[in-house]
């Protein structure tokens, strides 16, 4: 009997050296949701910070878990699959929030399934869950320079901070990301896509 809980997982890397970097957009968005729905996070098997809350929107009340994996980005699937198995949450009730270099800063795309697009956290979750049928809120962080040092540029880019201009927009962007996750849960994926993907 699958539980009626949803799981929202915001991806990032633990530790102060990663705070406020592009790769931690998922963590930052999870923090917005935690504050919004008064969710307090505590340890889940050393794999994640996890809490539960109730979302009350549009006349619906939905119970959900909120997770910030502590496994580092490339092993995010270990945390997500552990929580999913422990609480019997099917992939269709999982929403993963993550940074995406294929989208300009400030753009959001909502999708389910499809390619991991080179994102190691998503690859890890696909592998650990054995499916990609969960929903994703992709938060655009823009792209590093291409060229001979493309790989190093990419690593430095995702682990880098935001420009002053971007920092001004960050709170609103993260709030939109939180709204997108809520919309998937309350109104369904296609409504969320209509609302956010065209922006």
Image: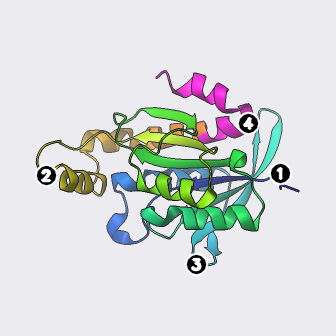
Q: Secondary structure at mark 1?
A: loop
Front residue (pair 34, 80): 80
- Give the distance between the C-alpha atoms of the residues marked 4 and 3, in whole angstroms: 30 Å
- Crowding near the residue tagged with mark 4, few <14, some 14–19, many ≥20 C-alpha atoms within 10 Å: some
Q: Main secondary structure of the magenta part?
A: helix
- Give the distance between the C-alpha atoms of the residues marked 2 and 3, in whole angstroms: 35 Å
- Give the distance between the C-alpha atoms of the residues marked 1 and 2, in whole angstroms: 47 Å
Q: Which residues are magenta?
A: 181-199
Comparing labels 4 and 1, the label whose residue is closer to the camera? 1
- Is disc 4 in contact with disc 2, using a CB cutoff of under 8 Å? no
- Give the distance between the C-alpha atoms of the residues marked 1 and 3, in whole angstroms: 24 Å
Q: Residue extending furthest right? A: 1
* Residue 40 visible to an observer of this rendering: no
155 horizontally vs 46: left or right:
left
N-terminal of the pair, mark 4 or mark 3, is 3
Front residue (pair 66, 100): 100
- Give the distance between the C-alpha atoms of the residues marked 4 and 2, in whole angstroms: 43 Å
- Is disc 4 in contact with disc 3, using a CB cutoff of under 8 Å? no
Query: Looking at the picture, does residue 174 appear above or below residue 47?
Result: above
N-terminal of the pair, mark 1 or mark 2, is 1
Report the residue marked by disc 2.
Answer: 149
Q: Secondary structure at mark 4?
A: helix
Labelled disc at residue 4: 1
Q: Quadrant of residue 134?
A: top right
Residue 40 coordinates in the image, percent (x, y): 65, 65
Q: Quadrant of residue 34?
A: bottom right
Report the residue marked by disc 3.
Answer: 46
Q: How many marks?
A: 4
Labelled disc at residue 186: 4
In the rendered image, residue 29 lying in the magenta stretch gets the answer: no
């Amino acid at each position: 009997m699958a539980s009626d809980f949803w799981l929202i997982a915001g991806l990032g890397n633990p530790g102060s050296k990663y705070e406020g970097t592009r790769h931690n957009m998922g963590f930052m968005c999870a923090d917005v949701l935690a504050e919004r729905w008064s969710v307090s996070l505590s340890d889940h098997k050393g794999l994640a910070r996890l809490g539960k809350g109730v979302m009350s929107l549009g006349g619906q009340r939905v119970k959900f878990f909120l997770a910030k994996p502590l496994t580092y980005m490339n092993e995010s699937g270990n945390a997500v699959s552990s929580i999913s198995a422990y609480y019997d949450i099917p992939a269709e009730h999982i929403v993963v929030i993550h940074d995406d270099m294929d989208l300009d800063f400030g753009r959001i795309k909502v999708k389910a399934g499809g390619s991991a697009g080179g994102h190691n956290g998503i690859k890890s979750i696909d592998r650990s869950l054995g499916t990609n049928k969960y929903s994703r809120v992709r938060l655009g962080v823009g792209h590093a320079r291409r060229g001979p040092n493309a790989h190093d540029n990419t690593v430095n880019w995702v682990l880098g901070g935001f420009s002053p201009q971007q920092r001004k927009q960050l709170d609103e962007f993260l709030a939109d990301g939180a709204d997108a996750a809520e919309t998937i849960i309350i109104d369904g994926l296609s409504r969320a896509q209509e609302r956010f993907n065209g922006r």
